[in-house]
Every structure is written in structure tokens, then in C-alpha cells.
Image: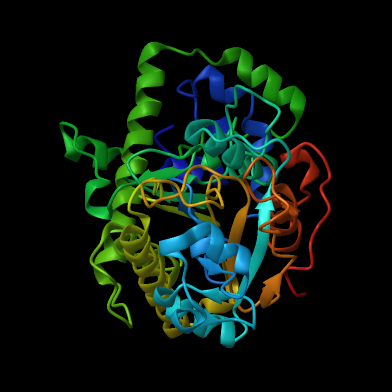
């Protein structure tokens, strides 16, 4: 095992691990033969990290008000229902004669005009749930019919497309890994900020020494057949010390990872000035990772504050400014680094808001809402039909597009993997991506 320099190399050299000796833990021994083939045939980012497709998932946590984001300014029913917070046609960024973007979303309107923004209207699912926690789990897992969920749709993508893949394949900005990114067999990274992702244990020099390559003794022979492998396994003795040795090397690999992430974040010189808020800084970190060719296929960042039950107008105005400025800076930075053609950005929120303004000048938990898709490969413009504001489901908008069809389209036409094993059923794909 001293010949294995990092856990990353372990993941990338499945057969070679069989020559490592008695320090291979038993829980790894069962899967080691599959790792080499899984790595070679994976549908994830190529090793260079310079030419694979990338998905950036943006969560609008709290339930974004779709009617204040994509505004049906020409609909009389909208003005009757929204009263004081209704936005007039002169105050929005018009997309057509009926709909307009919130005035703070000028960067997204520019992308719309350039053909790089698609707006999927009326997205939801049958029998919508209006609990923040349950609805978030539904969108994250893509499993509305399961009460207890243990994995997310992106995590299952990693499980199916890349078993045993490098943890860098997915990266979430935050203090914990969101359910969306959690797989049953695959673990990816979550970092709150690059400088915090560090090994802080004792005796760092000893851990660093574990990462130094050595020459493999000639006496070690790699098994070439399954029979040889079986005989070899029978000689392997798994001890507590061996397992600790493996965990130490795994910890060291986290240190190597953190060094690389911190280097990319500190050396990246963005072409634009990002907002100083948490959302903007998270997007800046993602842009640095992409520009630095980190082998990451899916990034995840969340922006909170959308639960606008009271005094919504000013709060939502600020949220839209944060969203527009952050995504605008991110996209300009991607263009400057030449990476925009291989990036797709997708926004989602766990639900929209109710049509009728409440007595506190806000809106309560609703159902269907729009999703934004950003990138040169998306079908630009307004996609799907805007929900009716008079034909409602107990006061909520009726959905026109199942969110799992959006996921299926992204999985099949962007991430290039079958969607049925991940989503559990074959949902219809949508004309939201161009070949």
C-alpha cells in the first residue's frame, strides 16, 4: 500500500491495488476489480478537466415567487391578485407582449437577447407538497412517491455513470453536502470556502510523507487472472492497523485536494468583479475551479431567503439583484476563460408562491414555478406554456411541465447517460437543448 500515493490513484488504478499487500481493507477488496473498468468507461469529466461538459445547479431555497420573477404584466388577473406588489409593464424587462423579467435581472435579460437563456415555464409535479423540507427532498431526490429518501438525482448519476469515481467529480459550495449530490455508493466534495477545506490534524508532516511515491518492490506480483486474484485474497490479512493506514492515506488525499482547490481559488483572476455576498463568492469559486480544469462534472450552489411571507416586495427585489448580479458575473467570467460552451446552468426552487397576495404583503407556499437554463447549447426563449392565473388548484398554479422531464433531458442530452436508471422511470425529454 505504500506504493499507492493517493486515494485518487487508487480510484484510477483498480488492478494495481491488488499488489499492495495486506493493508487493503476488506470493505474495499470486494469492489477493486471493477474500478479500473469503471474509470475507463465512465461518463464523467475527462481526466484533463478541460473539455468535458459541466452542469452547475443553482438552488433558490425557500420557494421563489415565480410570478415576481417572470412577470405576466399584461394579465389582468395578475394585477387583481397581487395588488400592491404587482409590477407594471413599464417596470419589467419585457420578453414579449405578455411576460417580462424582474427589473433586477438585467444580466439575464442580456443572455435572453443573446440566445443563451431558456425559461421553462410552469414546472412542478403531481400532488405538490408545500412543506419546505419535504418539497426540497422531492426536487433533490426526484422521487415524490418515497417518504424516506437517501440519495439525490445527481448522486445517483454519479453512482450509475461513474462507480468509484474521483470525489472531485462533484463539488457543492456549502458546509454540508446537499441531498441532490448524495449517492448510494459515491461521495463527492462539499466546501464552504476553499481556505476552510484543509487538513487540520496533528502531525501533518507524517501525513505528507504517506503521499510520497516509492518504488514498488519487484517481489510484488499483480494477479493476472481471477483465480490468481482469489488465491491472493486468501493470503491477505486485514488488521486494525491496516485500516487505519488506509484512512490516514485517505485523509492525506483530502489534504492534496484542498491544496489544489485553494491554489486554483487563490490564483484565479476573474475577468469581472463578483458581488461580495456569499452567493457571488460561491460562483466565483466555481468559475475558478472550471478555469483551473478541475475534473468536476457537476457543481452545486445555493442561495437562500426566498420564503417571502411578509413584506415581499423589497425582500424579493434584493434577492433578484443578488441572483442577477451573481449569475451575470459568473457567465462573463466563463466567457473570458473560454469555458462558456461547455457549461449548462440550471436553477430550481422547491416550489413557487400562491397567486393571491396575503394580508402581510407577501405570498404563501405555492406550487409551479419557472426554471432558468443558461448556456449556448440551450433552446433560447420561453419554453412551454405559462400557467393560467384563473384556472387554479386550490389557489395555486397548475404545473405544465414535470421537473423530472427537465432532469431526464439534462441527463440524456447534456450529461450523456441514460435517465431511467437514475430517475426510476423514463420521463419524456423536452426540446430544451440543441444538438
- Residue 220 in the image, given as x and y percentages of width and height: 53, 32
| Residue 23 versus residue 136 in the image, above or below | above
Q: Is residue 42 visible?
A: no
- Residue 308 in the image, given as x and y percentages of width and height: 39, 49
Q: Residue at x 54, y 31 (%)?
A: 134
Instruction: Look at the image and name its color scheme.
Output: rainbow
Q: Residue at x 54, y 16 (%)?
A: 236
With 245 as the anchor, is 208 left or right in this view? left
Q: Is residue 344 visible?
A: yes
* Total numbered badges shown on the rendered structure: 0
| Residue 271 versus residue 420 in the image, above or below | below
- Residue 130 in the image, given as x and y percentages of width and height: 55, 36
The extreme left residue here reads: 202
Q: Quadrant of the N terminus?
A: top left
Q: Residue at x 59, y 60 (%)?
A: 371
Nearest to the observer: residue 278 or residue 365: 365
With 208 as the anchor, is 95 left or right in this view? right
Q: Residue at x 62, y 13 (%)?
A: 234
Nearest to the observer: residue 311 or residue 317: 311
Nearest to the observer: residue 257 or residue 137: 137
| Residue 131 versus residue 375 in the image, above or below | above
Q: Quadrant of the C terminus?
A: bottom right
With 84 as the anchor, is 373 left or right in this view? right
Q: Quadrant of residue 232?
A: top right
Q: Quadrant of residue 76?
A: bottom right
- Residue 405 in the image, given as x and y percentages of width and height: 75, 52
Nearest to the observer: residue 363 or residue 288: 363
With 248 as the anchor, is 95 left or right in this view? right
Q: Quadrant of residue 226?
A: top right
Amino acid at each position: 500500500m505504500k506504493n499507492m500515493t493517493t486515494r485518487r490513484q487508487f480510484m484510477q488504478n483498480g488492478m494495481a491495488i491488488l499488489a499492495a499487500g495486506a493493508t487493503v481493507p476488506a470493505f474495499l477488496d470486494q469492489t477493486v476489480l471493477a474500478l479500473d473498468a469503471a474509470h475507463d468507461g465512465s461518463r464523467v469529466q475527462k481526466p484533463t478537466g478541460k473539455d468535458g461538459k459541466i452542469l452547475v445547479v443553482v438552488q433558490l431555497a425557500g420557494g421563489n415567487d415565480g410570478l415576481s420573477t417572470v412577470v405576466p404584466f399584461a394579465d389582468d388577473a395578475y394585477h387583481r391578485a397581487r395588488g400592491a406588489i404587482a409590477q407594471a409593464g413599464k417596470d419589467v424587462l419585457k420578453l414579449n407582449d405578455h411576460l417580462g423579467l424582474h427589473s433586477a435581472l438585467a444580466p439575464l435579460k442580456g443572455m435572453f437577447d443573446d440566445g443563451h437563456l431558456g425559461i421553462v415555464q410552469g414546472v412542478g409535479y403531481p400532488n405538490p407538497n408545500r412543506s419546505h423540507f419535504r418539497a426540497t427532498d422531492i426536487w433533490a431526490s426526484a422521487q415524490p412517491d418515497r417518504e424516506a429518501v437517501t440519495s439525490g438525482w445527481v448522486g445517483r448519476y454519479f453512482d450509475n455513470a461513474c462507480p468509484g469515481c474521483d470525489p472531485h467529480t462533484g463539488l457543492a459550495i456549502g458546509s454540508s453536502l446537499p441531498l441532490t449530490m448524495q449517492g448510494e455508493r459515491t461521495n463527492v466534495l462539499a466546501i464552504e470556502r476553499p481556505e476552510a477545506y484543509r487538513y487540520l490534524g496533528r502531525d501533518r508532516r507524517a501525513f505528507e510523507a504517506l503521499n510520497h511515491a516509492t518504488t514498488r518492490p519487484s517481489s510484488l506480483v499483480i494477479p493476472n487472472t481471477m483465480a490468481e486474484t482469489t488465491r491472493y485474497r486468501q493470503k491477505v490479512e486485514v488488521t486494525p492497523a491496516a485500516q487505519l493506514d488506509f484512512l490516514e492515506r485517505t485523509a492525506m488525499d483530502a489534504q492534496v485536494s484542498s491544496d489544489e482547490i485553494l491554489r486554483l481559488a487563490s490564483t484565479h483572476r476573474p475577468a469581472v468583479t463578483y458581488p461580495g455576498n456569499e452567493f457571488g463568492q460561491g460562483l466565483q469559486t466555481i468559475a475558478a475551479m472550471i478555469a483551473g480544469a478541475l475534473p468536476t462534472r457537476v457543481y452545486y450552489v445555493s442561495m437562500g431567503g426566498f420564503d417571502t411571507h411578509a413584506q415581499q416586495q423589497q425582500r424579493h427585489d434584493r434577492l433578484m439583484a443578488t441572483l442577477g448580479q451573481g449569475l451575470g458575473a459568473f457567465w462573463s467570467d466563463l466567457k473570458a476563460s473560454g469555458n462558456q460552451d461547455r457549461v449548462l446552468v440550471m436553477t430550481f426552487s422547491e416550489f413557487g408562491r400562491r397567486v393571491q397576495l396575503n394580508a402581510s404583503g407577501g405570498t404563501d407556499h405555492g406550487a409551479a414555478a419557472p426554471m432558468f437554463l443558461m448556456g449556448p447549447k440551450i433552446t433560447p426563449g420561453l419554453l412551454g406554456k405559462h400557467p393560467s392565473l384563473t384556472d387554479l388548484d386550490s389557489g395555486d398554479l397548475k404545473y405544465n411541465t414535470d421537473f423530472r422531464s427537465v432532469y431526464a433531458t439534462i441527463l440524456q442530452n447534456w450529461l450523456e447517460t441514460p435517465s431511467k436508471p437514475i430517475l426510476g422511470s423514463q420521463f419524456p425529454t423536452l426540446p430544451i437543448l440543441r444538438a
